[in-house]
Image (cartoon, rainbow, N blue to C red):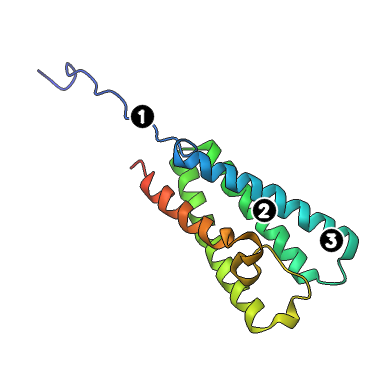
Amino acid sequence: MTDTERPEAPAKPSFELGTGPGRVLVWFYGVFTVAAASRSVVQMILDFDRAPLAYVLSAVAAVVYGFITYSLVRGGEKARRAALVCCAAELVGVLVVGAWTLAEPSAFPDATVWSDFGMGYLFIPVILPVTGMIWLRRAKTS
């Protein structure tokens, strides 16, 4: 049998990021996108002068959550890699902001989504990126 006569192997099915446990991640990231965006928009409109850093950081968190949600729903290797980078950046953000809010509470007259490592959100903001990175590494298609 020559190379041209060999039957093609069936294509490896694409791993869907938003299925199985990934569906739970999509749900959590979707809820956190809405929560962080709503919170930051309301706070920025009503009381921006009180704690601008906290409100901007909450808006940044919303954008990160939204991008990860989109990437998980979109699927594919490129989206998986982008979501993995965003989850790592999110984890760094949670750790930095969490430590900063404990070390210098006066810098944050109002809480952010990531304040005190997400204590106001049952520590989900620090657990979510770790869980996401584990899922995304497991979902690698190449």
Helix, strand or loop for disc 2: helix
User: 84 or 130: which is nearer to us?
Assistant: 130
In percent of width and height, residue 121 lies at: 64, 60
What's the residue type where badge 1 is placed? Answer: Pro
Instruction: Give the distance between the C-alpha atoms of the residues marked 1 and 2, in whole angstroms.
Output: 30 Å
> Residue at the spot x=90%, y=60% of the render?
46
User: 114 or 16: which is nearer to us?
Assistant: 114
Is 136 positioned to the left or the right of 119 in the image? left
**Tag 3 residue:** 44
Q: Tell us which disc is closer to us: 1 or 3.
A: 3
**Tag 2 residue:** 63
* Residue sitting farthest toward the front: 122
Instruction: Give the distance between the C-alpha atoms of the residues marked 3 and 2, in whole angstroms.
Output: 15 Å
**Tag 1 residue:** 13
Using a 10 Å C-alpha cutoff, classify the residue at mark 1 as few (fewer than 14 neighbours), some (14 to 19) or many (20 or more): few
In percent of width and height, residue 74 lies at: 54, 37
What's the residue type where badge 3 is placed? Answer: Met
